[in-house]
Amino acid sequence: MRALLAAGLALAALTAVAAEIAPEARRSGHDFASPEIRAMQDDETANPGMLWVLQGESLWARKAGAAANSCQDCHGDAGASMKGVAARYPAFDAVLARAAREGLSHQQFLHLLLADQAAQRRERSIARRIGEARFRDPKPLPAFDWEFNRAAIDRTQIEELATGAFIRRRDNLVLVGQSGVGKSFLIEAIGLSACALGLSVRLLLGCPQMPEL
């Protein structure tokens, strides 16, 4: 952990120096290399860095773990699902500008940089789980009209269900009531909350899907 922190602080120090160089004045190491080195880097068959690219392609499709899943099983073709990921890494210029403007310490800069990346990753993960859930018309619980059926629906109980505690306890949930009281809305809202909590959800409708349960 200390080694990771030290490496992070070193990165913060180096990027803080880079922040003093105007973006249009920054140059890649490729610009300062000899013609021979540049030619080697531009040739995928001669660039030794391509060995790691090929290894990454192999690892992407390699199955591992108790479930015997690979990255490819969930994310598909890397050329499509990971397109543009590398282009996001230089986006910390905005964080550098803020650090310089607010006089942030190296630790504060590092936290800001990592927190932003973690938040983006979490949002993508939630969006993926919501897509996999196959909701019909998902709406968040705060959008529910509690006054519509105040007598029939216990708001405190529903909000407790949305915490996902019953799922972690492995309890079953059955909502029973006449048509039009808001059962479908609440079920999807609870499922939406579960997705945000990092849980996998699947909406199944009707009897034909019962064998999948």
Image (spheres, grey):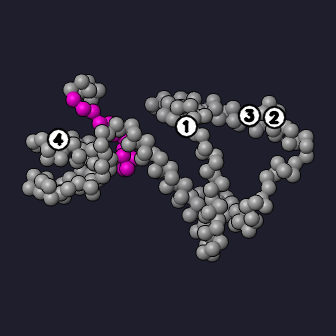
**In the image, is 21 to the left or to the right of 204?**
right
Q: Earlier in the sequence, mark 4 or mark 2?
A: 2
Over which residues does the magenta segment extend? 195-206
Reading the image, the residue beneath label 3 is: 51
Would you name the residue on which mark 4 appears? 174
What residue would you read off at disc 1?
A: 81
As drawn, 36 above or below 9: above
Magenta span contains residue 146: no
Q: Are marks 4 and 1 in contact (CB under 8 Å)?
A: no
**Residue 160 at x, y = what percent?**
23, 55
User: What SS does tag 3 mark?
Assistant: helix
Q: Secondary structure at mark 1?
A: helix
Circle 4: element type: loop
Residue 93 in the image: x percent, y percent? 65, 61
Q: Residue at image x 86%, y 38%?
A: 39
x and y, in percent, of residue 147 in the image: 15, 59
